[in-house]
Amino acid sequence: MDSLFNTNFESSPSPHTLPTVKLKAHTYELQESNVRLKLTIVDTVGYGDQINKEDSFKAVVDYIDAQFENYLQEELKIKRSLSAYHDSRVHVCLYFICPTGHGLKSIDLVCMKKLDQKVNIIPIIAKADTISKTELQKFKSKIVAELQNNGVSVYQFPVDDESVSEVNASMNAHIPFAVVGSTDFVRVGNKTVRARQYPWGTVQVENESHCDFVKLREMLIRTNMEDMREKTHCKHYELYRKKRLEQMGFSDVDADNKPVSFQQTFETKRSNHLQELQQKEDEMRQMFVVRVKEKEAELKEAEKELHAKFEKLKKDHTEERKKIEEARKKLEDEIVEFNRRKAQYQQMGQSHHTLTLGKRLHSKFL
């Protein structure tokens, strides 16, 4: 990427020991002469490094869908400002292919198949200086054949515009591009160029006889950048938008497969939604009435139980009071009887004392 945009992005190498694939987005403000470019580069950190590569593509697909979803939510806002919105949708995927010379790996075919309806894919053979030119041409042909046999659609430069149709048609024949990148500058003759220095010679990055880097840069940045943006919006995003709107209940045709306008769909959806709300309101009202009746029944039952307890306590209290009254009356009767007997015993004691005293006096006088 440094070679492609002639900029040092100061990116640090990522480790190859991550358990999952992670995507890191970096946004840069570039300017060349009077042209300003806001560039977002997304690195797929850890892609293909796992032992189980079955779900390696999932993080990439989820990220692309997330950017589509963010744009869709901005579109659906009542007060939207798409002119000020930072469009983070992915407009091109540079898919780097390992220069094995044997063909595509299974993970390459699976991933590109999952992505071809979501993003513009440009396949690139990385480190193309590691294989000979003859092997490189065979490798390119094999890659194209495998892509066609597996139904993988890659981005084709448009040929409908007469001003670029000829050059784009010739560049389509060079796909996949075989590139070499370098951050080093080497002195070659009277010029200082980006190149890779080897003991056997120098591979110049911008020499078209050495690699396809210049072709890629011309097609990607200068000739077809706007077409890729337009295709992303008009094809890939619209496919995602159509799918999401169908999930929300919106469709281009009715049950009889007749076209319907968005306003008709909106009114139908609104009517159905209001009916659902009314139905839920009726259900909640009915449920409220049922719960009120249940609560009233519970309160009545509780009141009945309290009344029964009160009557029982009242009865127990009356019986206890009656028992106490009977015990008190019995005690009073016993006290009266005791006092009567006490008085009787006292009277008998006095009579006995008088009789004894009389006998003593009689004996004394005798």
Image: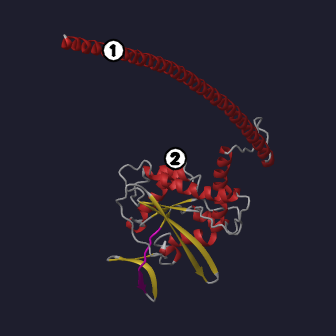
Q: Residue furthest front?
A: 365
Principal secondary structure, stretch drawn in magenta: loop
Q: Residue at x 26, y 13 (%)?
A: 358
Q: Give the x, y percent position of residue 46.
A: 40, 59
Q: Give the x, y percent position of residue 322.
A: 50, 18
Question: Which residue position holds label 2?
Answer: 150
Q: Residue at x 64, y 31 (%)?
A: 291
Q: Residue furthest bottom?
A: 190
Say which element carries label 1: helix
**Residue 123 higher or lower than 263, as above or below:** below
Earlier in the chain: of badge 2 and badge 1, it is: 2
Question: Which residue position holds label 1?
Answer: 345
Magenta extent: 179-188
Q: Residue at x 75, y 35 (%)?
A: 255
Quadrant including the C terminus:
top left
Residue 184 counted in the magenta span? yes
**Residue 202 higher or lower than 20, as above or below:** below
Residue 32 counted in the magenta span? no
Taking depth in this image into account, of 212 and 239 the one nearest to the observer is 239
**Residue 141 higher or lower than 302, as above or below:** below
Picture quadrant of residue 229: bottom right
Distance of label 2 from label 1 (alpha carbons): 134 Å
Number of callouts: 2
Taking depth in this image into account, of 251 and 217 the one nearest to the observer is 251
Mark 2 residue crowding within 10 angstroms, few (<14) / some (14–19) / many (20+) = few
Mark 2 against mark 1, which lies toward the viewer?
A: 1
Q: Give the x, y percent position of residue 173.
A: 56, 61
Taking depth in this image into account, of 2 and 138 the one nearest to the observer is 2
Q: Give the x, y percent position of residue 120.
A: 58, 59
Three-letter amino acid code of the residue under disc 2: Asn
Three-letter amino acid code of the residue under disc 1: Tyr
Picture quadrant of residue 97: bottom left
